[in-house]
Image: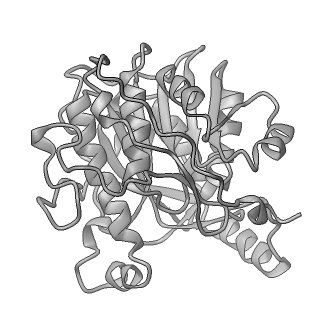
Amino acid sequence: MIWVSLLLLSPPPPALATPAAQTSRFSRYSLPSLPLVRRPKSELAIRSSAGTLHPQAWSTGCGGLRRGVMRGAASGGGRRFVAPTGQEGQTISAGDNIVVMGALDQVGRTIIGRLQKEGDFKISTLLSPNVLGMFKSKYPTIEAISASDEQEAKATLQKASVVIMAFEKPADTDTLRYLLGFGAEGEAKLKRFVLLSKTGVTRKNNIGMAFFKNVIGGELNKYFDLEDLLLKGADALKVDYTIVRSGKLRLGPDDFMNPDALSAAEDNLFQTRMGKIEFLSDDSKDGESNRYDVADAIIESLLRPSAANKIFSVINVEGKDKDMDTLFNSI
């Protein structure tokens, strides 16, 4: 059975209630509803049916969240930014609740596997009800929540210590608003919000490879908006973040389908030759990235306080060096 065929449109759930009596400072960030939309291949996003939220969704200082207004918050480099919390970044520890979004994609599934081996974490994800059964049969220890169940989805996010947004195709900004807003609202302290992005984000308007890649589909525009929104939202909500940019993803398909023989041979060659990793502290280089190395970089970033509030790229080059301590010290 082809996994992609299961990603059907589900009927929108009832609107999120925002009672007048609710006094939470995050209540105004709630999305009106959470219909699931079909995305290319295995991509899954949660978005608002009411269209774009107001630019002042988080604070008056976050104006211009829509494209073309007050642009420039997305950073070209991985230098350390001022921590939104005003404190040193926190690391994951045993017992933490970690929400992994993009769990149908190879990077997301690899992150789940690494977390299961790394420690005693409570891992959960939000999925379309159409795929819950198949996912649970493959990952019986992962708490898979129907994204159509508004109350349960909200409760899951409010228990989260970390939210990892690891979609291999860009979700929309309303998805990030929802995940970050409810995550920051919860009783549990949200230690970190991690976003998987793409190289070329800050060079998308410059004539070059990134520009021409962005002409078709505007993928870099979408990633720029996600980074821009996360930086502003993290600052407004006092949540630490890490943004990991990948090049063209290699090794493993981004859904449950098996690759054809030619693709598998090409991936084997890539893995043999391009076994070294580079972390780039600026968005100056395009290339290809091993999905498993990207997943490892995300997990390792959560184990290091110094990786909080940083943006960096993960690119594979010829060689075999993968010393994470050296790599993180380079940024």
What is the quadrant of residue 252 in the picture? bottom right
Which quadrant: the C terminus? top left
User: Residue drawn 81% across and 37% down?
Assistant: 136
Q: Where is residue 146 in the image (x, y as percent from the top left)?
A: 66, 38
Nearer to us in this view, 126 or 258: 126
User: Residue drawn 37% across and 61% down?
Assistant: 223
Q: Position of residue 36 (x, y in %)?
A: 58, 53
Residue 202 higher or lower than 323, as above or below: below
User: Residue drawn 54% across and 53% down?
Assistant: 45
Is residue 68 visible in this depiction of the protein? Answer: yes
Image check: 158 left or right of 233?
Answer: right
Q: Position of residue 64 (x, y in %)?
A: 15, 55
Label tally: 0
Residue 151 higher or lower than 67, as above or below: above
User: Residue drawn 66% across and 67% down?
Assistant: 41
Q: Which colour scheme is used?
A: one colour
Q: Where is residue 311 in the image (x, y as percent from the top left)?
A: 32, 48
What is the quadrant of residue 299 in the picture? top right
Is residue 200 visible in this depiction of the protein? Answer: no
Which quadrant: the N terminus? bottom right
Nearer to us in this view, 226 or 178: 178
Q: Which residue lies furthest to the right in this view?
A: 1
Residue 305 higher or lower than 253, as above or below: above
Image check: 116 left or right of 173?
Answer: right
Nearer to us in this view, 142 or 131: 131
